[in-house]
Amino acid sequence: MTIKYWPNQRSINLNNHTVDLFFSIENKLQYELSNRSNSYLCIDILNNLNKYKIFYITLIELKQLILELTELNLSHQDLKDLKQRILTIFTERVYNHFNTSINFLNQSKKKLLVTENETLIEHLLTYLLFGSSYITKNIFLFDPVYTPYYHVQILFENFIIIISNTIIENLLNQLKSYSKINYFLQTRDICNKSYLSNRSIALFLNNLKLQKFFSIYLYEPKSIYNERQQIWLISPYGIKTKYIYRKRSDKIKEFNQLKILFLFWLEIKDIVIPKIEKFLIQIGKYIIFFSINLLSNMILVGIRIMIFYISKSTYNKKIK
């Protein structure tokens, strides 16, 4: 199977690949959009029709953003310097566009993207605007010059899902109470049928909060330590997660004491647990060995006793 690579420089070929990628993702939005992963997303509260709507809005707003950034003829350093501002403006656009589509007039905005997502999105914009050669070496598993097309595609899909999720998270935070959220979702006919009651919405939001806590203090530090990154994909069977290699060792310096303690525990676990497992396996082998020997000896003793009594019985009969 021939691997298709992403262009590494600005060129007509890069523009063609970018256009092709937009068409490809737009076609994938026709797939089943239910969440098939083991993690929760804020967009799970939407029905598939409105999930498609917010994905599509994010897609066309990204298309517009790429055109505008291309016309501005920014350098790669400009993109790095302005990335937070660009993402803020972009999320506001998507937020306003989606709110207009569902007749929601509250226009207050809050930037919710976390640093990790901003960095991944910066990589995506770099691929789309400048080509793969502008990506720093050793961040991903392969040489930037030989970046697979599929790698850029999954970053694109992850971007669509992350931005859409951020918008819905913002929306839910503004509505605040469970009853208001329930009323809002049902009056606009955008609610997933699994969340039609206040109780189901409360359970859903509590699960999101718990997941966020574990993600910040357990899963994310572990992923950084193991040089892995969870991303979201649109598959023919629904939304799912995948882990890719991504080096972020510099992020460890930003960890607080709790996260450092967790990493220390991971180090201890990696050293101690294998030795404990080896010790327990060895003990288990000895126990099995002695048990088998004991059982064998007991069987032999039993057989000898039986032979003794049979012989004795035969001898007594002969005497009689």
Image (tube, helix red, strand yellow):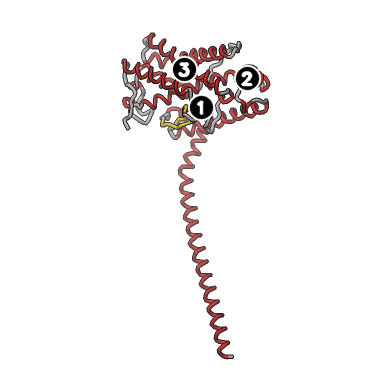
Most distant residue in the top direction: 72
**Gap in Å between the C-alphas at discs 3 and 2?**
23 Å
Name the mark on residue 185: 2
Mark 2: give few (<14), some (14-19) or many (20+) Cα within 10 Å: many
User: Regarding mark 3 in the picture, which secondary structure is present there?
Assistant: helix
**Gap in Å between the C-alphas at discs 2 and 1?**
21 Å
**Residue 54: x and y, percent?**
52, 18
Q: Is residue 112 left or right of residue 228?
A: right
Q: Which residue is mark 1?
A: 32
Determine the image quadrant of residue 7. top left
Quadrant location of the N terminus in the rendered image = top left
Disc 3 marks a residue whose amino acid type is: Leu
Mark 1: give few (<14), some (14-19) or many (20+) Cα within 10 Å: some
**Residue 153: x and y, percent?**
41, 24
Q: Pointers 2 and 1 in contact (CB under 8 A)? A: no
Q: Is residue 208 left or right of residue 159?
A: right
Disc 2 marks a residue whose amino acid type is: Leu
**Residue 104: x and y, percent?**
60, 13
Q: Nearer the viewer, residue 263 or 10?
A: 10
Residue 107, compared with residue 21, is above or below; it is above
Q: Which residue is mark 3?
A: 59
Determine the image quadrant of residue 133. top left
